[in-house]
Amino acid sequence: NIICQYATSASATSEQATYLASYATNAPNADGECLSSIGGFSWAPTSWSVPAQLNLTFATPVYATNFTIFGDQGMSWQSIWLYNDNTNEWVQVSGFSNACVHKQVLTTQNFKSSKMKLIKTTWDWSATDAVQLCGKV
């Protein structure tokens, strides 16, 4: 069985008062145009130039088959990582991405994962509306 799920909890190393990490959970609800953002719909760090990390947790561990990151403004990820629940190690699954909606198919993940971390670049906002992880249960 393959399921798709949105992050159920989130934390970040930096966030604005009206762009909390928790706004990157659940289904997308921002406008999706990626040119500007409105507070209360997505996560964003305190400044476009600060290093920041968005940490996401999913309710059901899966053997990941694909994921989608829904941006809200100026998406620029330095790297994207999945957590190997079996070995307690982070595995990098993508390098740089500046897509407004980053979709990625995974073909070599042979471990269950319930966490993802997104590390932003230091030259853009990377405001994030939602993250969906799909995989085999």
Image: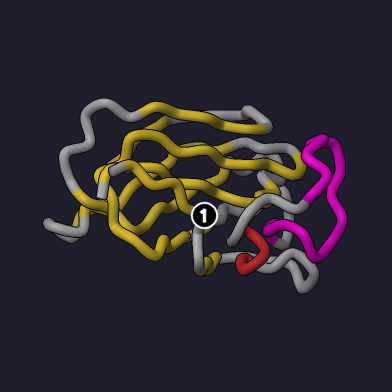
| SS for callout 1 | strand
Decide: is 33 above or below 105: below
Q: Main secondary structure of the magenta part?
A: loop
x, y (%) of residue 86?
A: 13, 57
Q: Is residue 40 magenta?
A: yes
Q: Is residue 82 magenta?
A: no
Residue 19 figure quarter: bottom right
x, y (%) of residue 27?
A: 63, 54
Q: Is residue 116 left or right of residue 27?
A: left
- Dot 1, crowdedness within 10 Å: few (<14), some or many (≥20)? many
In the image, farthest residue toward the left:
87
Decide: is 10 above or below 1: below
Decide: is 44 above or below 12: above
At x 87%, y 56%, the residue is 38
At x 52%, y 57%, the residue is 54
Colour mode of the rendering: secondary structure
At x 62%, y 29%, the residue is 98
x, y (%) of residue 43?
A: 68, 59
Q: Is residue 26 left or right of residue 5?
A: right
Q: Is residue 49 visible?
A: no
Q: Is residue 25 visible?
A: yes
At x 66%, y 44%, the residue is 126
Residue range of the region highlighted in magenta in the rendering: 30-45
In the image, farthest residue toward the bottom:
17
Judging by the rendered image, the residue that carries numbered circle 1 is 6
Q: Amino acid at mark 1?
A: Tyr
Depth check, front residue: 115 or 4: 4
